[in-house]
Image (spheres, helix red, strand yellow):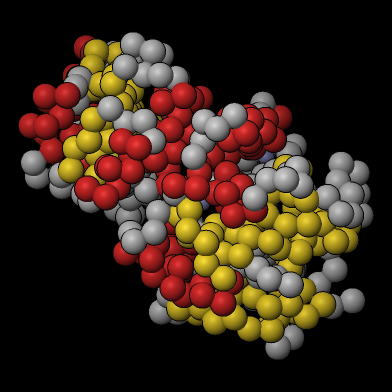
Amino acid sequence: MVMKIQAAVARKGAIVDIETCELSEPAAREVRVRLEACGICHTDLLALGGQLGTKMPAVLGHEGVGRIEALGDGVVDFAVGDRVLMSFGACGCCAACESHDPAYCDAAFALNFAGRRRNGSAPMSLGGRPITSHFFSQSSFATHTLASTQNMVRLPEDLPPELMAPLACGVQTGMSAMLKVLNPQRHSRVAVFGCGTVGLAAVMAAALRECERIVAVDLKPQRTDLARELGATHAVVSDSHSLQEQLLALGPFDAAIDCTGNVPVIEQAFQSLAIRGQLVCAGVTPPGRKLNICPRELVFGGRQLRGTVEGDAHPRTFIPEMIDHYRKGRLPLEKLVRVYPFAEVNQAIADLSSGVTIKPVLKMSH
Ligand SMILES: [Zn+2]
Ligand SMILES: [Zn+2]
């Protein structure tokens, strides 16, 4: 039976309209979720802006929190009534998934960006026509959706949905990139380039490790001020032109993360690495750009340069760890989040694009 839902439908031009759509029955290993909240992430903006090849019309949204209302066949680990957080899509059975690296699932593109289930069907339609949905195996800019249970995590009742939603992607990416990929120690000197959700989450993670030096870099002083509140020991407000000098004064760095995707920034971040320093790239660069770095500095300094998807996180273990930090008062997520009613989705998108809001979270009312 098809159900009528309200969903934020994106069309060309980066504006969405809340429209009545149809939601089909849950397929095998899917559940129907009534949404409470969904964060907006830069990947939603990339999809809206056409940079991911997303076919329009589309229902985006990939940081959903809600309650399970119905189960598809074969769902054994969740029940109707469970409150859940939905992370990214993964198959659960390829070599990467089996080694707890679902971010590098063989089917990652199909399950997160293809806009259809793997069998070609679409969970959502508009006026009887299938539309791009199943985004990150969820499409959570809606009152209800169908989601895969693969990277779903049960959420205790007392946790606020608007603060938990960003754990599904943005906060998870920054924290896991810092803790799991870079793994700095107390004596480490750390640099974070770009202070949006991912960068600020990386700052919070470095602060959890009590790193001796945590340098936050951004164009906007409001953002580096917030980074200082979250544990950064130094702030650099700069564009790529005057960055090098300031980095020289504060570096070199044992661990650095780029969350800007800006090529000159990545190059300077690499140049600021200490001997055996690591730079991990988490920001998405437009296609076709090239890095200009000196391979001798990689070799003779034993340096490392690598990228990460979702901070290499394994959501089912990492999200509960983040929740534990939050409960102990070590993750002030409320400093990143601003709540918008679902109806104000366009304002929320505009505020994320302009940088006025670090992490907009939509709240659905039922
Ligand atoms: Zn897989
Ligand atoms: Zn995301």
Task: Give the quadrant of residue 232.
Answer: top left
x%, y% of residue 157?
76, 47
x%, y% of residue 117?
71, 61
Q: Residue at x 21, y 41 (%)?
A: 265
Please state which of residues 262 and 6 is positioned toward the viewer in this rendering: 6
On screen, residue 81 versus residue 159, left or right, reads right
x%, y% of residue 200?
39, 40
On screen, residue 236 versus residue 111, left or right, reads left
Q: Residue at x 68, y 78 (%)?
A: 6
x%, y% of residue 230?
39, 36
Q: Residue at x 58, y 72 (%)?
A: 342
**What quarter of the picture does the C terminus occupy?**
bottom right
Please state which of residues 70 and 296 is positioned toward the viewer in this rendering: 70
Using the rendered image of the protein, determine whether residue 35 is visible from the camera's viewpoint: yes
Q: Is residue 118 above or below residue 204?
A: below
Residue at the outermost bottom position: 127
Using the rendered image of the protein, determine whether residue 135 is visible from the camera's viewpoint: no
Q: Is residue 227 above or below residue 28?
A: above
On screen, residue 214 versus residue 105, left or right, reads left
Ligand 1, seen in the image, is in the quarter at top right
